Amino acid sequence: MGKIKSKQKIIINGQKRLSGQVRVAGAKNAALPELAAVLLSKGPFKFQDVPLVEDIKVMFHALENLGASGEFNGNKVHIETPRITSELVPREIVETSRASILILGPLVARNGYARVSKPGGCNIGDRNINYHLQGLRLMGAVIDEEHEHIVARAPRPLKAIEYEFPAQSVTGTENLLMAAALADGTTVLKNCALEPEVGDLIELLQAMGSEIDGKDTTTLTIKGKTSLKGTSHKMIPDRIAMGTYVIAGCLGENQITVENARPEYIRSLLDVLEQIGVNLVIGEDTITVAPNGLSRAVEVVTEPYPGYPTDLQAQLTMLLTQVDGVSRIKETIFNNRFQHAHQLNLMGADIDVDEVEHIATIKGITPLRGTRLMATDLRASAALVLGGLIASGRTVIENAYQLFRGYEDMPGKLKTLGADISVEY
Ligand code: EPU
C-alpha cells in the first residue's frame, strides 16, 4: 500500500448530476523529468502549465536541496541552478515519488557525483531501475547501491553510448536522454518509450540546445553538448487526467466537456469507450462525452503508448462495473495494480482478480454504495473517487494524499461540475 502521508480524507455524497466543462492541467509525468532537466544547465528556466500537485512539489523541493532556486507563481515556475551545492537527494524529501531516479541522470552528468534515495512512488508492483543503471554504467558511471541510496560517480563528461532498452521504460528513456545530452559524442538509444511525455522532454532539451533526432520513434540519436542553456517551456496537458475526466463524463446522464484536451494522446481510451457505446464528440482540443448507455462489455490489455495506458486501468475498471456484461482487463505493465478492485468490491462491485495472470474480470452492472475506502495508490484513488460519484450515500476515501500526488485540485474541479465532494484534513 502507498505510504500514508496524512490524515486527509475525501468525502463524497454520491449520485449528483454532473455537467459542464473541466480543464485539464499540465502533465505531471512531463513536469517531473522536465524539472529534473534544469539540472543540466545553469538556466534560467520559465515553465508554464506546471501542475500544482504533490509529486511536483516534492521534485521542486529536491531541486532546491541541490542548489536550485526558484518560485511557483500559480502554474508558472521560474527556476535556475547556477551552482550545484549538494549531491544528495534525501529519502525524507522524495520517499513518495519517482523524483530521485529522474534526478540521477542529469545530476551525475553535470556534477560527476550523485547520492540519491532509492525511488518511491506508487506501490503498484516491481518498479525496476536496472535499465537506468545499466545505461549510466555504460556511460562511465560507477554505481553502488547502498541500503537506502544509489551512489554514482562518473567522469565528466559522460561517454556517449549505443544502448538498446531490453523493454520500453518511460523514465528510463528520459533519464538516459538527459544524461546523453551532456555526454561526449553521439548516443543512440534504441527501443525507447513513445509516451508523449518523452516527446515533450525532447522538445525541452532541443530548446536548451540539444541535438536530438528521432522524436516519436523508438530510436533516439543525441549529439552531446558541452553546455546547455535555459529556456521557456509550456508543459503538455495531462493525458491521464484527461482520460479520468472523460471516464467521469461516461458515468452520468449529462454532457461533460474536457478542455485543454489532446484527443490523439488518449486514442486508445476513446476507442474502448466507443466500443462500449459511449457517444463522444471529439474536437481539436476538447472531448465532449454525451452518454447514451454503456451497452457492450469489452476486453482490454494495458500496453506501452500508444496502447491502452496502465495509468487509466483503474478508472476503466471502475467504469466497467457499470457496463452490462462481463469485461476483462489484463494488466501487463505492473504486477500489483489491481488494489482498487478490492476497494470497489467493498462498494458492491463484482470484480475477480487473477493475481497470477494479472487479469480482472468485471461483471456489470452492479449498483455501488458509499462506504469507507482506502486509497492505495494514485490512479486507484481516482477510481475510488469515480466510484463515490455514482454510489448511493456517503463515500469516505482515506489516505487522500495519493490523489493529490497527481491530480490538480480534482475535488474542486468535480465540485464545479456539480459533485458533492469535500476534503477533510
Ligand atoms: N522496468 C524494468 N527496468 C527498468 C525500468 C522499467 O524492468 O529499468 C519495467 C518496470 O518494472 C515496469 C515496466 O518496465 O514493469 C515499465 O516501467 P516504466 O519504467 O516505463 O515506468 P516508470 O518510468 O517507472 C512511468 C510513469 C508511471 C507509468 C509508467 C508506465 C512517471 C514519473 N511515471 O513510470 O506513472 O505508470 O511510466 O506508463 O513518468 C502514474 O502517474 O500514476 C504512474 C505510475
Image: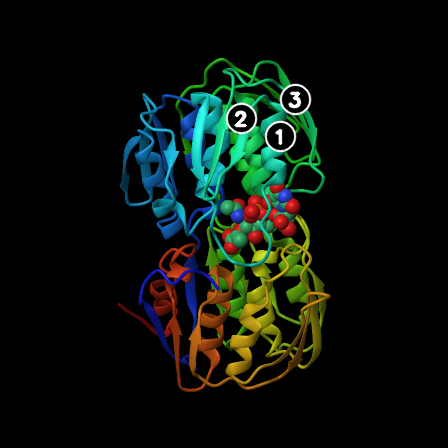
Q: At 44% from the left edge and 29% from the top edge, which residue is drawn?
A: 114
Q: Which residue is mark 2?
A: 179
From mark 2 to mark 3, how far is it between C-alphas? 11 Å
> Which one is earlier in the sequence, the residue at label 2 or at label 3?
3
Type of the residue with mark 2: Ala
Residue in front for this viewpoint, 146 or 113: 146
Q: Quadrant of residue 40?
A: top left
Note whether ligand 1 is within 8 Å of mark 2: no
Q: Measuring from the top left, give residue 158's x and y in whole percent.
A: 55, 19
Assess mark 1: CB under 8 A from ligand 1? Answer: no
Closer to the N terminus: mark 3 or mark 1?
1
Tell me where residue 200 appears, x and y as whole percent: 53, 36
Q: At 60% across and 27% down in the image, what residue appears? A: 137
Residue 235 visible to an observer of this rendering: no
Indicate the quadrant where residue 44 lies.
top left
Q: Which mark is residue 135?
A: 1
Instruction: Kindly identify which residue carries mark 3.
Output: 161
Q: Is residue 64 left or right of residue 127?
A: left
Residue 249: x percent and y percent?
Answer: 51, 69
SS of the residue under disc 1: helix
Q: CA distance from mark 2 to mark 1?
A: 9 Å
**Is 261 drawn above or below residue 49 in the view shown?**
below
Q: Residues within 10 Å of mark 2 (few under 14, many from 20)?
A: many
Q: Are marks 2 and 1 in contact (CB under 8 Å)?
A: yes
